Image (cartoon, rainbow, N blue to C red):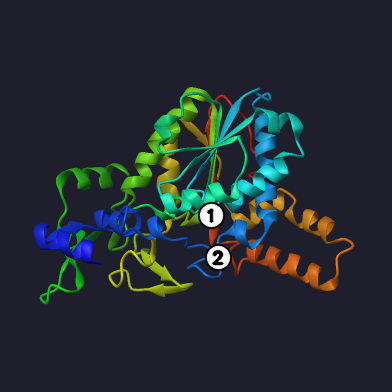
Amino acid sequence: MNKIINILKKQKSIPLDQFINIALYDKKFGYYMKKNPFGKDGDYITSPLISNLFSEMIAVWCVAFWESLKKPKKFFLVELGPGDGSLCKDLLETFKNFKDFYNSVNIRLLEKSITLKNLQKSRIKNSKVKWIKEINNLNSGPIIFICNEFFDSLPIKQIYKKNNLLFEKYITLSKNKKNLKFLYKPAKKNLIKNIKKHNLISGGKTIEYPTSAIKYIELIAKRINNFKGGILSFDYGYTHQKNHNTLHAIRKHKHANILLQPGNSDITSHINYQLFLKIFEEKNLKVEKVITQSEFLQKLGIIHRANMISKNKTFKEKADIFYRLKKLIHNKEMGSAFKVFFAQNKKTKFSLGFK
Protein backbone atom coordinates (compact mmCIF):
# COMPACT_ATOMS: atom_id res chain seq x y z
CA MET A 1 0.00 0.00 0.00
CA ASN A 2 2.78 2.44 0.92
CA LYS A 3 4.44 1.90 -2.46
CA ILE A 4 1.27 2.83 -4.36
CA ILE A 5 0.64 5.86 -2.11
CA ASN A 6 4.21 7.06 -2.69
CA ILE A 7 3.81 6.69 -6.46
CA LEU A 8 0.50 8.58 -6.37
CA LYS A 9 2.02 11.42 -4.34
CA LYS A 10 4.41 11.96 -7.26
CA GLN A 11 2.21 11.08 -10.26
CA LYS A 12 -1.23 12.01 -8.79
CA SER A 13 -2.92 9.16 -10.69
CA ILE A 14 -2.10 5.90 -12.48
CA PRO A 15 -4.18 3.81 -14.95
CA LEU A 16 -5.99 0.77 -13.55
CA ASP A 17 -3.76 -1.73 -15.41
CA GLN A 18 -0.62 -0.15 -13.91
CA PHE A 19 -2.19 -0.33 -10.43
CA ILE A 20 -3.05 -4.04 -10.91
CA ASN A 21 0.45 -4.78 -12.18
CA ILE A 22 2.03 -3.20 -9.07
CA ALA A 23 -0.48 -4.84 -6.70
CA LEU A 24 0.13 -8.31 -8.15
CA TYR A 25 3.65 -8.32 -9.60
CA ASP A 26 5.83 -5.70 -7.93
CA LYS A 27 9.01 -7.52 -6.84
CA LYS A 28 8.67 -6.64 -3.14
CA PHE A 29 5.09 -5.51 -2.76
CA GLY A 30 3.17 -7.72 -5.25
CA TYR A 31 0.64 -10.28 -4.11
CA TYR A 32 2.07 -13.14 -6.22
CA MET A 33 5.66 -12.19 -5.42
CA LYS A 34 5.60 -12.64 -1.67
CA LYS A 35 3.27 -15.53 -0.83
CA ASN A 36 1.67 -18.80 -1.92
CA PRO A 37 -1.99 -17.85 -2.49
CA PHE A 38 -3.19 -21.37 -3.28
CA GLY A 39 -5.00 -23.96 -1.18
CA LYS A 40 -7.12 -23.93 1.98
CA ASP A 41 -4.60 -21.77 3.84
CA GLY A 42 -4.34 -19.34 0.93
CA ASP A 43 -6.95 -17.24 -0.82
CA TYR A 44 -8.36 -19.64 -3.44
CA ILE A 45 -8.20 -23.22 -4.74
CA THR A 46 -7.52 -24.19 -8.34
CA SER A 47 -8.65 -27.30 -10.25
CA PRO A 48 -5.34 -29.25 -9.92
CA LEU A 49 -5.59 -28.86 -6.12
CA ILE A 50 -9.16 -30.16 -6.06
CA SER A 51 -8.44 -33.45 -7.81
CA ASN A 52 -5.52 -34.98 -9.70
CA LEU A 53 -8.14 -36.30 -12.14
CA PHE A 54 -8.02 -32.81 -13.69
CA SER A 55 -4.29 -33.13 -14.34
CA GLU A 56 -4.70 -36.70 -15.63
CA MET A 57 -7.22 -35.57 -18.26
CA ILE A 58 -4.91 -32.78 -19.44
CA ALA A 59 -2.01 -35.25 -19.58
CA VAL A 60 -4.03 -37.64 -21.77
CA TRP A 61 -5.04 -34.72 -24.00
CA CYS A 62 -1.37 -33.66 -24.37
CA VAL A 63 -0.30 -37.18 -25.35
CA ALA A 64 -3.08 -37.36 -27.96
CA PHE A 65 -2.11 -33.94 -29.37
CA TRP A 66 1.53 -35.04 -29.56
CA GLU A 67 0.43 -38.14 -31.49
CA SER A 68 -1.52 -35.93 -33.92
CA LEU A 69 1.72 -33.98 -34.50
CA LYS A 70 3.27 -37.31 -35.65
CA LYS A 71 5.12 -37.95 -32.40
CA PRO A 72 8.04 -35.49 -32.70
CA LYS A 73 11.18 -36.78 -30.96
CA LYS A 74 11.55 -33.44 -29.23
CA PHE A 75 8.87 -30.93 -28.35
CA PHE A 76 8.02 -28.43 -25.61
CA LEU A 77 5.17 -28.34 -23.14
CA VAL A 78 4.94 -24.84 -21.66
CA GLU A 79 2.81 -24.04 -18.63
CA LEU A 80 2.04 -20.36 -18.18
CA GLY A 81 1.68 -19.32 -14.54
CA PRO A 82 2.22 -22.75 -12.93
CA GLY A 83 1.08 -21.65 -9.45
CA ASP A 84 2.27 -24.00 -6.72
CA GLY A 85 3.48 -26.58 -9.28
CA SER A 86 0.65 -29.08 -8.64
CA LEU A 87 -0.42 -29.38 -12.28
CA CYS A 88 3.12 -29.88 -13.59
CA LYS A 89 3.95 -32.41 -10.86
CA ASP A 90 0.82 -34.47 -11.60
CA LEU A 91 1.32 -34.23 -15.38
CA LEU A 92 4.81 -35.72 -15.03
CA GLU A 93 3.46 -38.67 -13.03
CA THR A 94 0.90 -39.47 -15.75
CA PHE A 95 3.38 -38.88 -18.59
CA LYS A 96 5.62 -41.63 -17.15
CA ASN A 97 2.95 -44.12 -18.27
CA PHE A 98 3.59 -43.11 -21.90
CA LYS A 99 7.26 -43.94 -22.45
CA ASP A 100 7.78 -42.49 -25.95
CA PHE A 101 5.97 -39.29 -25.03
CA TYR A 102 7.90 -38.94 -21.77
CA ASN A 103 11.22 -39.37 -23.58
CA SER A 104 10.27 -36.64 -26.07
CA VAL A 105 8.75 -33.98 -23.82
CA ASN A 106 10.65 -30.97 -22.48
CA ILE A 107 8.71 -28.92 -19.94
CA ARG A 108 9.14 -25.18 -19.54
CA LEU A 109 7.46 -23.16 -16.78
CA LEU A 110 6.89 -19.43 -17.21
CA GLU A 111 6.84 -17.88 -13.74
CA LYS A 112 7.35 -14.25 -12.68
CA SER A 113 7.29 -14.82 -8.93
CA ILE A 114 10.55 -15.84 -7.23
CA THR A 115 8.52 -17.08 -4.24
CA LEU A 116 6.34 -19.34 -6.39
CA LYS A 117 9.31 -20.44 -8.50
CA ASN A 118 11.11 -21.60 -5.36
CA LEU A 119 7.97 -23.44 -4.25
CA GLN A 120 7.70 -25.12 -7.66
CA LYS A 121 11.38 -26.12 -7.58
CA SER A 122 10.95 -27.68 -4.14
CA ARG A 123 8.05 -29.79 -5.41
CA ILE A 124 9.23 -30.69 -8.91
CA LYS A 125 12.48 -32.64 -8.99
CA ASN A 126 12.86 -33.56 -12.65
CA SER A 127 15.59 -32.70 -15.16
CA LYS A 128 12.94 -32.36 -17.90
CA VAL A 129 11.61 -29.23 -16.24
CA LYS A 130 13.22 -25.82 -16.67
CA TRP A 131 12.02 -22.30 -15.92
CA ILE A 132 11.83 -19.43 -18.39
CA LYS A 133 11.27 -15.70 -17.85
CA GLU A 134 9.85 -14.80 -21.27
CA ILE A 135 7.98 -16.49 -24.11
CA ASN A 136 10.76 -15.07 -26.30
CA ASN A 137 13.05 -17.66 -24.66
CA LEU A 138 11.26 -20.35 -26.73
CA ASN A 139 13.11 -20.74 -30.03
CA SER A 140 12.11 -24.20 -31.27
CA GLY A 141 9.12 -26.53 -31.20
CA PRO A 142 6.55 -27.90 -31.62
CA ILE A 143 5.08 -26.18 -28.55
CA ILE A 144 1.98 -27.03 -26.53
CA PHE A 145 0.99 -24.18 -24.21
CA ILE A 146 -1.11 -25.04 -21.14
CA CYS A 147 -2.77 -22.37 -18.96
CA ASN A 148 -5.01 -22.74 -15.94
CA GLU A 149 -6.27 -19.45 -14.49
CA PHE A 150 -3.45 -17.53 -16.16
CA PHE A 151 -5.14 -14.91 -18.33
CA ASP A 152 -7.65 -13.82 -15.66
CA SER A 153 -4.78 -12.68 -13.43
CA LEU A 154 -3.30 -10.26 -15.96
CA PRO A 155 -3.85 -6.48 -15.75
CA ILE A 156 -6.70 -4.91 -17.70
CA LYS A 157 -7.85 -1.41 -18.55
CA GLN A 158 -11.43 -0.34 -17.87
CA ILE A 159 -13.19 2.28 -19.95
CA TYR A 160 -16.48 3.85 -18.87
CA LYS A 161 -19.04 5.03 -21.42
CA LYS A 162 -21.06 8.14 -20.68
CA ASN A 163 -23.04 10.25 -23.17
CA ASN A 164 -21.15 8.62 -26.07
CA LEU A 165 -17.83 9.67 -24.55
CA LEU A 166 -15.18 7.25 -23.27
CA PHE A 167 -13.34 7.67 -19.95
CA GLU A 168 -10.48 5.50 -18.70
CA LYS A 169 -10.42 4.36 -15.05
CA TYR A 170 -7.46 5.56 -12.97
CA ILE A 171 -6.46 5.25 -9.32
CA THR A 172 -5.75 8.35 -7.24
CA LEU A 173 -5.48 9.40 -3.58
CA SER A 174 -8.38 10.61 -1.46
CA LYS A 175 -8.20 14.03 0.18
CA ASN A 176 -6.53 12.66 3.32
CA LYS A 177 -3.73 11.17 1.15
CA LYS A 178 -4.12 7.84 2.97
CA ASN A 179 -6.82 6.02 0.98
CA LEU A 180 -7.27 5.15 -2.68
CA LYS A 181 -10.18 6.02 -4.93
CA PHE A 182 -11.16 5.71 -8.59
CA LEU A 183 -10.84 8.58 -11.03
CA TYR A 184 -12.04 8.80 -14.65
CA LYS A 185 -10.08 10.62 -17.35
CA PRO A 186 -10.91 11.06 -21.05
CA ALA A 187 -9.62 7.98 -22.89
CA LYS A 188 -6.61 8.52 -25.14
CA LYS A 189 -7.03 8.34 -28.93
CA ASN A 190 -4.90 5.21 -29.34
CA LEU A 191 -6.91 3.33 -26.70
CA ILE A 192 -10.21 4.36 -28.34
CA LYS A 193 -8.82 3.21 -31.69
CA ASN A 194 -7.98 -0.25 -30.27
CA ILE A 195 -11.37 -0.60 -28.59
CA LYS A 196 -13.15 0.21 -31.84
CA LYS A 197 -10.83 -2.09 -33.80
CA HIS A 198 -11.89 -5.02 -31.58
CA ASN A 199 -15.61 -4.10 -31.69
CA LEU A 200 -15.84 -3.53 -27.94
CA ILE A 201 -17.98 -0.38 -28.04
CA SER A 202 -21.49 -1.83 -28.28
CA GLY A 203 -23.62 -2.59 -25.20
CA GLY A 204 -22.92 -1.95 -21.53
CA LYS A 205 -21.23 0.94 -19.77
CA THR A 206 -17.91 -0.61 -18.69
CA ILE A 207 -15.52 -1.89 -21.36
CA GLU A 208 -12.68 -4.15 -20.24
CA TYR A 209 -9.58 -4.15 -22.41
CA PRO A 210 -6.99 -6.86 -21.56
CA THR A 211 -3.76 -5.08 -22.50
CA SER A 212 -1.35 -7.69 -21.06
CA ALA A 213 -3.32 -10.69 -22.32
CA ILE A 214 -3.28 -9.35 -25.88
CA LYS A 215 0.52 -9.04 -25.76
CA TYR A 216 0.79 -12.64 -24.55
CA ILE A 217 -1.60 -13.86 -27.24
CA GLU A 218 0.51 -12.20 -29.95
CA LEU A 219 3.73 -13.82 -28.62
CA ILE A 220 2.07 -17.24 -28.23
CA ALA A 221 0.50 -17.12 -31.70
CA LYS A 222 3.86 -16.25 -33.26
CA ARG A 223 5.49 -19.32 -31.66
CA ILE A 224 2.65 -21.63 -32.71
CA ASN A 225 2.77 -20.32 -36.28
CA ASN A 226 6.56 -20.71 -36.46
CA PHE A 227 6.98 -24.06 -34.72
CA LYS A 228 3.53 -25.76 -34.84
CA GLY A 229 1.54 -26.77 -31.77
CA GLY A 230 -1.28 -25.04 -29.92
CA ILE A 231 -2.63 -23.56 -26.69
CA LEU A 232 -5.15 -25.08 -24.27
CA SER A 233 -6.50 -22.67 -21.64
CA PHE A 234 -8.91 -22.93 -18.69
CA ASP A 235 -10.33 -19.77 -17.14
CA TYR A 236 -13.33 -17.86 -15.84
CA GLY A 237 -15.00 -16.08 -18.71
CA TYR A 238 -17.98 -15.39 -20.94
CA THR A 239 -18.64 -16.26 -24.57
CA HIS A 240 -21.19 -13.55 -25.43
CA GLN A 241 -20.31 -9.89 -25.57
CA LYS A 242 -21.34 -8.10 -22.38
CA ASN A 243 -19.64 -4.90 -21.38
CA HIS A 244 -19.69 -4.72 -17.61
CA ASN A 245 -17.34 -4.65 -14.65
CA THR A 246 -15.99 -8.15 -13.87
CA LEU A 247 -12.98 -6.92 -11.90
CA HIS A 248 -12.86 -8.21 -8.32
CA ALA A 249 -10.46 -8.98 -5.49
CA ILE A 250 -10.30 -12.20 -3.44
CA ARG A 251 -8.81 -12.70 -0.01
CA LYS A 252 -9.24 -15.79 2.20
CA HIS A 253 -11.72 -17.30 -0.30
CA LYS A 254 -14.01 -14.25 -0.06
CA HIS A 255 -14.55 -11.15 -2.18
CA ALA A 256 -12.59 -8.12 -1.02
CA ASN A 257 -12.37 -4.41 -1.85
CA ILE A 258 -9.85 -3.88 -4.67
CA LEU A 259 -8.66 -0.58 -3.17
CA LEU A 260 -8.14 -1.93 0.36
CA GLN A 261 -4.83 -3.63 1.13
CA PRO A 262 -3.56 -3.96 -2.46
CA GLY A 263 -0.70 -6.43 -2.49
CA ASN A 264 -2.55 -8.63 0.01
CA SER A 265 -5.40 -9.87 -2.18
CA ASP A 266 -5.75 -11.39 -5.62
CA ILE A 267 -7.17 -9.16 -8.35
CA THR A 268 -8.85 -10.90 -11.24
CA SER A 269 -11.29 -10.35 -14.12
CA HIS A 270 -13.31 -12.55 -16.45
CA ILE A 271 -12.10 -13.44 -19.94
CA ASN A 272 -13.95 -12.10 -22.97
CA TYR A 273 -13.60 -15.24 -25.10
CA GLN A 274 -15.12 -13.59 -28.15
CA LEU A 275 -12.24 -11.12 -28.13
CA PHE A 276 -9.58 -13.76 -27.43
CA LEU A 277 -10.73 -16.02 -30.24
CA LYS A 278 -10.97 -13.08 -32.65
CA ILE A 279 -7.35 -12.11 -31.94
CA PHE A 280 -6.08 -15.70 -32.30
CA GLU A 281 -7.92 -15.97 -35.63
CA GLU A 282 -6.44 -12.63 -36.74
CA LYS A 283 -3.03 -14.15 -35.95
CA ASN A 284 -3.78 -16.97 -38.40
CA LEU A 285 -4.52 -19.74 -35.89
CA LYS A 286 -7.36 -22.24 -36.08
CA VAL A 287 -9.69 -21.93 -33.09
CA GLU A 288 -12.13 -24.51 -31.72
CA LYS A 289 -15.39 -23.36 -30.17
CA VAL A 290 -15.21 -22.43 -26.49
CA ILE A 291 -16.78 -25.07 -24.26
CA THR A 292 -17.31 -25.49 -20.52
CA GLN A 293 -14.78 -27.24 -18.30
CA SER A 294 -17.48 -29.80 -17.52
CA GLU A 295 -18.04 -30.66 -21.18
CA PHE A 296 -14.32 -30.88 -21.92
CA LEU A 297 -13.44 -33.12 -18.96
CA GLN A 298 -16.40 -35.42 -19.55
CA LYS A 299 -15.52 -35.84 -23.23
CA LEU A 300 -12.05 -36.91 -22.12
CA GLY A 301 -13.57 -39.59 -19.88
CA ILE A 302 -13.15 -38.14 -16.39
CA ILE A 303 -16.25 -39.92 -15.01
CA HIS A 304 -15.07 -43.28 -16.38
CA ARG A 305 -11.65 -42.68 -14.86
CA ALA A 306 -13.21 -41.81 -11.49
CA ASN A 307 -15.19 -45.06 -11.58
CA MET A 308 -12.02 -47.00 -12.36
CA ILE A 309 -9.89 -45.59 -9.54
CA SER A 310 -12.74 -45.86 -7.00
CA LYS A 311 -12.89 -49.66 -7.32
CA ASN A 312 -11.74 -51.49 -4.17
CA LYS A 313 -11.75 -48.19 -2.26
CA THR A 314 -13.49 -47.68 1.08
CA PHE A 315 -16.81 -45.84 1.13
CA LYS A 316 -15.08 -42.77 2.57
CA GLU A 317 -12.39 -42.80 -0.16
CA LYS A 318 -15.03 -43.20 -2.91
CA ALA A 319 -17.08 -40.36 -1.46
CA ASP A 320 -14.01 -38.11 -1.49
CA ILE A 321 -13.18 -38.96 -5.14
CA PHE A 322 -16.72 -38.13 -6.34
CA TYR A 323 -17.05 -35.07 -4.11
CA ARG A 324 -13.94 -33.65 -5.75
CA LEU A 325 -15.14 -34.70 -9.20
CA LYS A 326 -18.42 -32.87 -8.61
CA LYS A 327 -16.55 -29.64 -7.81
CA LEU A 328 -14.76 -29.90 -11.17
CA ILE A 329 -17.72 -30.70 -13.43
CA HIS A 330 -21.01 -29.72 -11.75
CA ASN A 331 -22.64 -26.65 -13.31
CA LYS A 332 -23.18 -25.07 -9.89
CA GLU A 333 -19.49 -25.51 -9.05
CA MET A 334 -16.60 -24.97 -11.51
CA GLY A 335 -18.18 -26.93 -14.36
CA SER A 336 -19.83 -24.07 -16.24
CA ALA A 337 -18.07 -21.07 -14.64
CA PHE A 338 -14.80 -22.20 -16.21
CA LYS A 339 -14.45 -22.26 -19.98
CA VAL A 340 -11.88 -24.01 -22.16
CA PHE A 341 -10.46 -22.82 -25.45
CA PHE A 342 -8.01 -24.36 -27.86
CA ALA A 343 -6.14 -22.65 -30.70
CA GLN A 344 -3.71 -24.48 -32.98
CA ASN A 345 -1.47 -24.10 -36.02
CA LYS A 346 -3.58 -24.25 -39.18
CA LYS A 347 -1.50 -27.17 -40.47
CA THR A 348 -2.61 -29.40 -37.58
CA LYS A 349 -5.97 -31.11 -37.23
CA PHE A 350 -6.83 -32.00 -33.66
CA SER A 351 -10.11 -31.61 -31.80
CA LEU A 352 -10.13 -34.08 -28.87
CA GLY A 353 -12.46 -32.79 -26.17
CA PHE A 354 -14.08 -30.20 -28.47
CA LYS A 355 -16.13 -32.35 -30.88
At horizontal 73% and vertical 29% (from top left) the residue drawn is: 100
In this rendering, the answer to whether 111 lies above or below 29 is: above
Q: Is residue 3 left or right of residue 134?
A: left
Q: Residue furthest right?
A: 312
Q: What element carries label 1?
A: loop
Mark 2, Cα crowd under 10 Å, few <14 / some 14-19 / many 20+, is: some
Using the image as rendered, state which of residue 10 and residue 344 is in the foreground: 10
Q: Picture coordinates of residue 72 (x, y %)?
A: 65, 23
The answer to whether residue 264 is seen in the rendering is: yes
At horizontal 16% and vertical 62% (from top left) the residue drawn is: 6
At horizontal 29% and vertical 62% (from top left) the residue drawn is: 206
Q: Picture coordinates of residue 234 (x, y %)?
A: 54, 51
Q: Quadrant of residue 185?
A: bottom left
Name the residue carrying label 2. 39
Mark 1, Cα crowd under 10 Å, few <14 / some 14-19 / many 20+, is: many
The answer to whether residue 283 is seen in the rendering is: no
How many numbered marks are there?
2
Q: In this view, does 185 lie to the left or right of 350?
A: left
Q: Is mark 2 on a helix, strand or loop?
A: loop
Q: What is the CA distance from the residue labelled 1 to the residue labelled 2?
A: 9 Å
Name the residue carrying label 1. 84
At horizontal 10% and vertical 75% (from top left) the residue drawn is: 175
